[in-house]
Image (tube, helix red, strand yellow):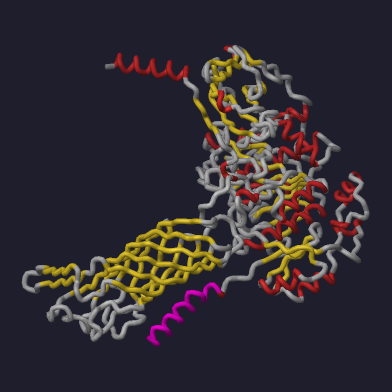
Amino acid sequence: MIKHKRIAFTFIFLIWLPALMVAQPRYWVQFTDKHGTTLTPQEYFCTKTLERRATENVSPTDSTDFPLNESYIAAVNGIASDKGKESRWLNAVAVSASKNEIKRIEKLPFVKQVKPISGAWTTAKVIQKKSSDENNDHLWDILYRQTERMGGRYFRDSSINGKGVRIAVFDAGFPNVDTHPAFEQIRKDGRIIATWDFTKNRSNVFRGNSHGTNVLSCIAGIHDGTAMGLATGAEFLLAITEVNSEPFSEEENWMAAMEWAYKNGADIISSSLGYTFNRYFPKDMDGKKSFVVKAASLAARKGMLVINAAGNDGDSDWKVIGTPADADSILSIGGISPETNLHINFSSYGPTADGRMKPNVSAFGEAVVAKPKGGVEIAYGTSFSTPLVAGFAACAWQASKGKTAMEMLKDIEKSADLYPYFDYAHGYGVPQAGYFLYSAKDSVNSTFSLYETGEYYSVYISYGLVKLLSGYNTSILFYSIEKPDGTLAEYGAARVYQEQALNFKKSAFKIGYKLNVRYLNYYATFELGAKEPVDHEITANL
Amino acid sequence: MKKTLSMLAILLFSLAGYSQTILMEDSNPMAPYEVKTHGPNLKNYGQWFIGFGAVTPVGANSDNTIFGKSLLFDLGYRYRYRVSNFFNTGFDLSYYLQGNRLNKSGMLKVYDGLVHGRENIVQNEFRFSPFFRFNLTPKRGNFLGTYVDLGGYVAWNFLPVFRAVDTKTSNNEMLKYTRQFDPMQKRYEYGLTGRIARNKFIVFAHYRLSDLLKNSSLPDLPRLAAGVQFGI
């Protein structure tokens, strides 16, 4: 029996051994103040940022860009095992520490809070690499339409290409951006303003994962004279923030990159960052939980437009958007299918956990991207919808000089083809260039009629608008049932074959519920839940 | 026939004109946010698993088993209750099959006094295995993460089998002898269980504390078995 005991103890020890070898967790240690620190803006910021700060009347006492208090950092370093990046905006430093060390750090009088750092984000979902045959009709069709779907020709006809707008791209690597023909014009014009690899602390970013090269091409690449993105005249800041082998450092890198981008004059940040099940539960997607949300929101307040992928979990158990796409002040981008013009299956759905509408807008989730080794190919993911919209936003901003980031965010939403209709799969739809060049959209008159028949409400559309043999998206009717608090109880899309386009059970409408319908350029709202009984037609509110 | 097909096609086409084709719909957008209690990192979680492994030399008094040919198979259901982020508890219910291939030098002749070409002691068991789980990634979302399970098992050997196979050298004929409900094996046993796992990939080990054979004068069989399990 003694022998058994010895073997049993050995057995338990061997089982526990790998557990003892697990790396220490990382935390953000946030301080209470920046007592005793100062900043000389002229030395710290680039000219573009200084101009923006002057325009926006940033107070000299705004300490968010001040450095951290060195004595606080030293005190934390004295306890923690390893120090990581610092965040001026959040007044925090990243550390590796054991539970006991964290308890000691939390007791320091100048420590406001300690939060664990997330790990493992997602980049693009490259489901399938299709043929890279450059004569492939499908490839050329997608290439042409990925910008045309956003009305790209209107920007091109007006010589708008994002000139003067600076876009920061955060990704996992940009191999061969320094040699690939798709980026020749950018290199020739010297429009890669700054680069930094936050994972290795060096300036060379033309290495690593090809995802960043793919993404950049969707903003500004040119393939055989055809623009892959709309901002072919924009300036760029390229940052590597993602590294698969050290997932816990990614959040630190992303926050540091955000401050670096601001310092270097970025107007727009295009990022495919997304934390989901690794750290959070769906209920946490309320735009408040994560540190990156705070940083992204601060970036928006400082005048940068942050554009982030909604995520690629639409067809997984997670289903909803990740963080920081849940942040209020971020333009979250969903994906649509070029074939159906409807939500592409993997694109993550809204709303946020607290019921706010997300994604904000959509773009193609299937796009032609530059391959680092030369040529192009088709790739899938909201990671590619995001740079398509980033390129669009740069052009829109060029056409709307003087507007703030938040005004641009609202305008991009308004420009979308479904606006004011929205749902949690498409947001407001695909942004349209025409909105920024030709002011308001065409006025819309109701073309819908709503009738009560027995247990149903029936939506009718005019006979002349039933387009059986029409092309993309023109015969799709979008509908949503809206609750009194503005959230959607139900939504969907149907193909219109006949005047009696869609039927709804009356029982779907509780008190205060509305029916929103969108077809072609027409939009109507019917207030049904609280209405008095009617016999026939119900009038729409436009 | 042609006419019928044409009529059918026309009918289908005309019916399509009167139908409502929903291309996409979501009738409960808030469903992902509804409070759930069942999931990999929620209060309750159930998981089917399948395991494969081999007997190891650990715990054998002598070299009685041919290692590498003594294999095991495990199929069962695991229930886990989350007490805290770090500490969970639960149990397995499983069907467990282990074949102990005997080495000619030791255990042969123990059953019938004859030397056979190949001999196997086979355990067919139902196992109940309670365990404690220690999560090494306590701050995580709704996935299993990395964890260590420590526990024990009690097993009912519901079908102990002894199997012998001889090959006659003259005409290469195979002679098989199978003894169901082998009286030499104990019907109940117990032991320790340990696992280390990352999500649904699990490395496990069982250590048998009880004896397998009733006759304590016989050399014992190896006690430690190890292998991999996959959550289904």
Locate residue A82, reporting x and y percent.
70, 72
Furthest residue in direction left, as rendered: B170
**Residue toward you, A490 or A506:** A506
* A39 in relation to B164, above or below: above
Locate residue A172, reporting x and y percent.
64, 56
Determine whether, in the image, residue A480 is placed left or right of residue B132. Answer: right
Q: Quadrant of residue A257?
A: bottom right
Locate residue A382, reporting x and y percent.
61, 44
Locate residue B99, reporting x and y percent.
27, 70
Residue drawn 72% across the image and 40% down it: A231
Quarter of the image with the N terminus of chain B in it: top left
Determine whether, in the image, residue B200 is placed left or right of residue B113. Answer: right
* A25 in relation to A78, above or below: above
Residue A213 appears in the figure: no
Is residue A59 within the magenta segment? no
**Residue toward you, B215 or A364:** B215
Q: Quadrant of residue B220?
A: bottom left
Q: Which residues are magenta?
A: A1-19
Residue drawn 40% across the image and 74% down it: B192
